[in-house]
Image: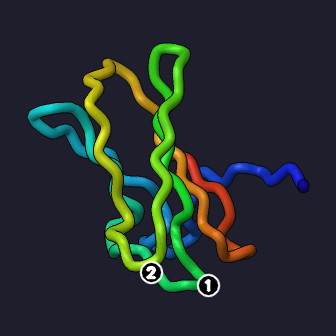
Amino acid sequence: MDLQQEKAADAGREKYVPVIEETDSGIKVKVGDVPHPMEEKHYIEWVEIIAGGKSCRIFLSPGQKPEAEFDIKPQRVTAREYCTFTVCGNLRYN
């Protein structure tokens, strides 16, 4: 297993940075302003939030929407996602 560096910027590829939205029941994290592809060999494997010293991760599969909903209303949250495509890797948004 290799340790990967988190990326905090998207370098113009709007479909990779996590977008955090408030909902009635908590928060929704969408991967990208433009939805990320969810193909067999190139998809978002998981979306994770970190808040209050705890983390919660939802795993996704090819064909699903590149988003996850969490029943939590934190004051401050960090969202991360992991793309299976080697060049994309791990991205974070605070």
Q: Is residue 56 above or below residue 42?
A: above
Question: In the visual, does 33 lie left or right of 14?
Answer: left
SS class, disc 2 = loop
Residue denoted by label 2: 37
Q: Which amino acid type is shown beneath numbered disc 2? A: Pro
Q: Residue at x 53, y 55 (%)?
A: 46
Residue 90 image point, x, y percent? 65, 56
Asked if residue 94 can be seen in this view, the reply is no
Q: Is residue 69 above or below residue 17?
A: above
Residue 47 image point, x, y percent? 48, 50
Q: Residue at x 90, y 55 (%)?
A: 2
Residue 50 image point, x, y percent? 50, 29
Q: Which of 72 and 19 lies nearest the eye of the viewer?
A: 72
- Looking at the image, which residue sits at the far top? 52
Q: Which amino acid type is shown beneath numbered disc 1? A: Lys
Residue denoted by label 1: 41
SS class, disc 1 = loop
Q: Quadrant of residue 35?
A: bottom left
Residue 31 image point, x, y percent? 41, 62
Q: Is residue 21 above or below residue 59?
A: above
Which numbered circle lies on residue 33? Answer: none
Give how far apart the Cα atoms at labels 2 and 1 are: 10 Å
